[in-house]
Image (tube, helix red, strand yellow):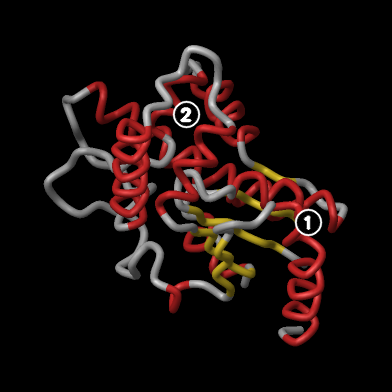
């Protein structure tokens, strides 16, 4: 089974790379589908789930995902429910067969299924430029604002990872392949990446 996880810096093009890689391999890519299913199963708004799906829950003590404990904070209860649901949904998708999964610590949650784990990154200016190029109408695309957003989201992703493992988010030793998209069109990287992925799985049979 070929399961590929994509971890990525905000603005690096990791989501696009995951989708294009999945298309080239002829396998499903799971990203927004995870959020939609969590929302449907728990009666939450998709925007709310999206907002929390890769953020650390605000607790002052360690926790094991899936372990029940008592809390009187309804917001915290919802956050825990989202994280627990996300974990189960990731496993359900992976068990269906070959796939690419973007974000949400899938590399850690699915490690017993031996996925290939890719980290996508880029230089700060390249990330700002990509955010501007892909920006929506009415969005604040001031470079200083975007840089602040990039740093904040990456900080949240790093903290979220700490819920599942003590390995550092973005540390090359935590992944099988790190891809720098600086100065590159994401689609131009895919053919070589497909060859690498196929070779990696062949070597790890």
Position of 55 compared to 7: left or right?
left
Q: Could you tell me which residue is drawn at 66 percent across and 45 percent down? A: 16
Residue 97 numbered mark, or none: 1
Q: Could you tell me which residue is drawn at 39 percent across and 71 percent down? A: 171
x and y percentages locating residue 137 in the rendered image: 54, 14
Which residue is identified by label 2? 50
User: Closer to the observer: label 2 or label 1?
Assistant: 2
Q: Looking at this view, is 159 or 84 the one in front?
A: 159
x and y percentages locating residue 162 in the rendered image: 30, 58
x and y percentages locating residue 28 in the rendered image: 78, 46
Report the residue that reaches farthest toward the bottom: 203
For disc 1, the neighbor class at 10 Å (few under 14, some 14 to 19, many from 20) is few
Q: What element carries label 1?
A: loop
Q: Looking at this view, is 138 or 165 the one in front?
A: 138
Quadrant location of residue 32?
Answer: top right
For disc 2, the neighbor class at 10 Å (few under 14, some 14 to 19, many from 20) is some
Q: Is mark 2 on a helix, strand or loop?
A: helix
Position of 52 compared to 133: left or right?
left
């Amino acid at each position: 089974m070929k399961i590929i996880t994509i971890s990525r810096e905000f603005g690096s093009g990791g989501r696009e790379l995951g989708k294009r890689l999945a298309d080239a391999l002829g396998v499903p890519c799971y990203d927004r589908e995870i959020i939609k299913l969590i929302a449907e199963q728990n009666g939450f708004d998709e925007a709310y789930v999206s907002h929390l799906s890769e953020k650390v829950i605000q607790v002052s003590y360690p926790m094991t995902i899936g372990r029940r404990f008592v809390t009187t904070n309804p917001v915290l209860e919802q956050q825990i429910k989202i994280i627990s649901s996300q974990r189960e949904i990731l496993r359900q998708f992976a068990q269906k067969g070959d796939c690419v999964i973007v974000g949400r610590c899938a590399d850690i949650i699915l490690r017993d299924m031996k996925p290939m784990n890719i980290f996508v990154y880029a230089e700060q200016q390249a990330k700002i430029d990509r955010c501007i190029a892909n920006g929506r109408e009415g969005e604040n695309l001031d470079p200083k604002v975007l840089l602040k957003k990039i740093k904040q989201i990456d900080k949240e992703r790093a903290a979220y990872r700490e819920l599942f493992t003590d390995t550092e988010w973005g540390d090359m030793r935590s992944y099988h392949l790190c891809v720098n998209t600086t100065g590159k069109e994401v689609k131009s990287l895919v053919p070589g990446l497909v060859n690498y992925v196929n070779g990696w799985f062949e070597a790890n049979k």
